[in-house]
Image: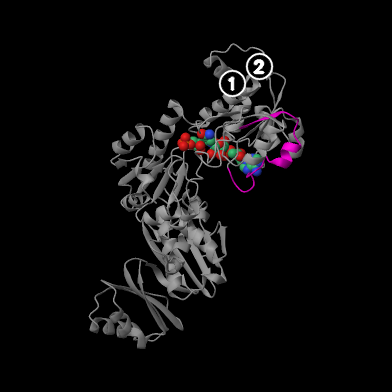
Amino acid sequence: MVLQLKKVFISDEVDPRCVEVLKENGIEVVKDTKLRTDKEKFLAEIAKYDGLIVRSATKVTADVINAATNLKIIGRAGTGVDNIDCDAATKRGIIVMNTPGGNTLSAAEHTCALICCLSRDIPNAVATMRDGKWDRKAFMGSELNGKTLAIIGLGRIGKEVALRMQSFGMTTIGYDPIIPGSVSSQFGVEWMELEQLWPKADYITVHTPLIPQTKNLLGETSFGKCKKGVKVVNCARGGIIDEVALLKALDDGQCGGAGLDVYVSEPPDDYNLAKHPKVIPTPHLGASTVEAQKRVAVEIAEQFVDVMNGKSLFGAINAQAMYNALSPATQPWVTLGKCLGSLLSTQGADSKQGVCISYAGTDLKDAGSYLSASVLSGLLATQAGGEGSTLNLVSAPALAKQLGVNVECKYKSVCSSGLFAEVCVKVGGNTVVGTTSGSQSLIVSINGTKFATPAVLSGSMILFQANSSKDLVAKLLGSLTDSGATVTGLSVTTPGQSQWGLVYLASGSTNSLDSIKSLVQSAVLLQL
Ligand SMILES: NC(=O)c1ccc[n+]([C@@H]2O[C@H](COP(=O)([O-])OP(=O)(O)OC[C@H]3O[C@@H](n4cnc5c(N)ncnc54)[C@H](O)[C@@H]3O)[C@@H](O)[C@H]2O)c1
Ligand SMILES: O=C(O)[C@H](O)COP(=O)(O)O
C-alpha cells in the first residue's frame, strides 16, 4: 500500500532537519509545538493532516485520533510510543511508527553518567562547591570496579549500557524474557532469573518498556531481596521502579541512591523524590543530545517518505500485515483478497463461522499475513462502524479479533486449478477461488462452479445464480437493457445444473438489479 502523504503536522520540538527532509520530498509541513496545549484548537487542526510527528510531550489519545479524520500515519521521533493510543490508531487503520535505535546511544550514555554520578555523589559535591564550601569528608565514594551491575531489559539500550560499564570493571548480570543467555553472553552479560539477580546486584538499571509486566517491577518486595544500600537507575519509563517504595527504601537505607530520568508523571506532581538528597534527578534528558535529536528527526522523516513511496515500513509497530504488501508485485493480490472478501460478504457469508484462506503458487509463498488482512478488509467492511472508520490492512485484523473471527491461513505449493497461483477463501458454506492477471483480480470459481474463463472483478457488476436454461442469458440481457442499464460484458460459469454469472454494467443501479430478480435465484450488485 502506498500512502498519500500530502500534509504532515509536527507538534513537538523536533530537529529542523525533519521538516527539511519532508519538504524536499514534496510534503507540506506545519510545525507548531504550542498548539497541543489548547486541546480544542489541536483537535480542530489535526483533521487537516495525513501525518503527525511527535516526541513524548504530545499525548496522542483516542480523542485526538478520532478527530484526525484524514490521518494515515503517526511518527514518534524517538523510541517509546506509550504517549500514543496505539489500539485506537490501529482500529482507525492508522500506522504508528517509531525510530528504533535513533537515540539508543544517548540514552545509554545518560544511564552510565548517572551510575558514575551515584558512585561518587558528584551532584551533591558540586552543590557544596557552588555554595562556597570545601567539604572533602562528606563525599567518600566507592569504586565501580569489581561491583555488580544488574541490567533488567537487555534490548538496545541495556546492551550498550553493559558494554560501557564493563570497561569500568563492573560485572554485568541481567534478565530479559526474550533475550536468552546465549545471546546476552555475547555482550558479556550473565543471564539469570530476577530472583537470583536481586541479591547479587550493587547497582540495578532498568531498560524495559512500561507494560503491565514491568510496572512496579522494582518495588517493596524486590527491594527487600536486594543488598542493603543497592543503587538504582531508571532511564526507561517512570513506574518501572515503584516511586513510593523507592522513597521508603531511600529513607530507611535499603536503597543507597537513585538516578532518575523518568517519572510516573512528567513533570512530577510533587518533587519529594526528585528533591531527596540521595536522588540524582534529570528531567527526561536521555535522548536530549544534538546527535540523537538529529538522527531521530531525519529517520522519522525518511521513514515517512519510504512509506509514501511504498519502499519500506521500517519502524512500524502495528502494521505487520503490510510488511510483505508494499511491493508492486503483491498489490494485485492485496486487491484480489479484498474483492474475494467483499464478494463473500454479499453472499451473506457469516465470518463468525471462521475464515479459511488457502493460497498456492510460488508467487504467494510469503503472502499469508497480507492476504488474511486483505480478505478481512473486504469481508468485514459492512461491520466497520464508527465515525471515520477505515478498514484496511492495519485495522482489519484488529476488527476481526474484536469480533471474535477466527482466521486460518494455509499455503500449498501446488495449485489445484492448474493456474500459476490462486487464492481460495471459504466462509461457512461459501467458497470463492481467485487469481490475478497483471493488475486485474479474477474470479476462478464460486461454490465449486468454475467460470468458463476466469472473470474480471472490477467496476459495477451483478453477480447472479440461476438454474441453467438455454435462453437465460438472452432474457437477462433483454431485461437489463429494458431497465435502461448499459451492459458492457458478461461472464458465466460452465454450463451445469446451476449457473453463476457476472454481468458488467457501465454503472450499477438497484433498478437494473430489480429487473432481473424474477429470472434468477439470487443476484447482488457489486462495486469493486
Ligand atoms: N530516557 C529517555 O530519554 C529514553 C530514551 C530512549 C528510550 N527510552 C526508554 O528506554 C526503554 C528501553 O528502550 P530500548 O530502545 O532499549 O528498547 P528495546 O525494545 O530495544 O529493549 C527493551 C527490552 O525490554 C525487554 N523486556 C520486556 N519485558 C520485560 C520484562 N518483563 N523484564 C525484563 N525485560 C523485559 C524486551 O524483551 C526488550 O529486550 C524504553 O522504555 C524506552 O521508551 C528512554
Ligand atoms: O522513548 C524515547 O525515545 C525517550 O523517552 C525520549 O523521549 P523524548 O523524545 O521526548 O526526549
Circle 1: element type: helix
The label shown at residue 138 is 2
Instruction: Name the amino acid type tagged 1.
Output: Asn
Position of 150 with respect to 5 (left or right) is right
Identify the residue position indicated by label 1 in the image.
124
The relative height of residue 468 versus residue 528 in the rendered view (above or below) is below
Circle 2: element type: loop
Quarter of the image where one finds residue 17: top left
Label 2 crowd (10 A; few <14 / some 14-19 / many >=20): few
Quarter of the image where one finds residue 231: top right
Quarter of the image where one finds residue 515: bottom left
Instruction: Name the amino acid type tagged 2.
Output: Ala
Residue 222 on the magenta span: yes
Which residue lies at the image location 60% right of the left edge and 42% below the top edge? Answer: 239
Magenta stretch mostly in which secondary structure? loop
Q: How is the image coloured?
A: one colour
| Residue 228 shows in the view | yes
Which residue lies at the image location 50% right of the left edge and 54% below the top edge? Answer: 87
Query: Which residue range is magenta in the image?
Result: 210-233
Residue 223 on the magenta span: yes
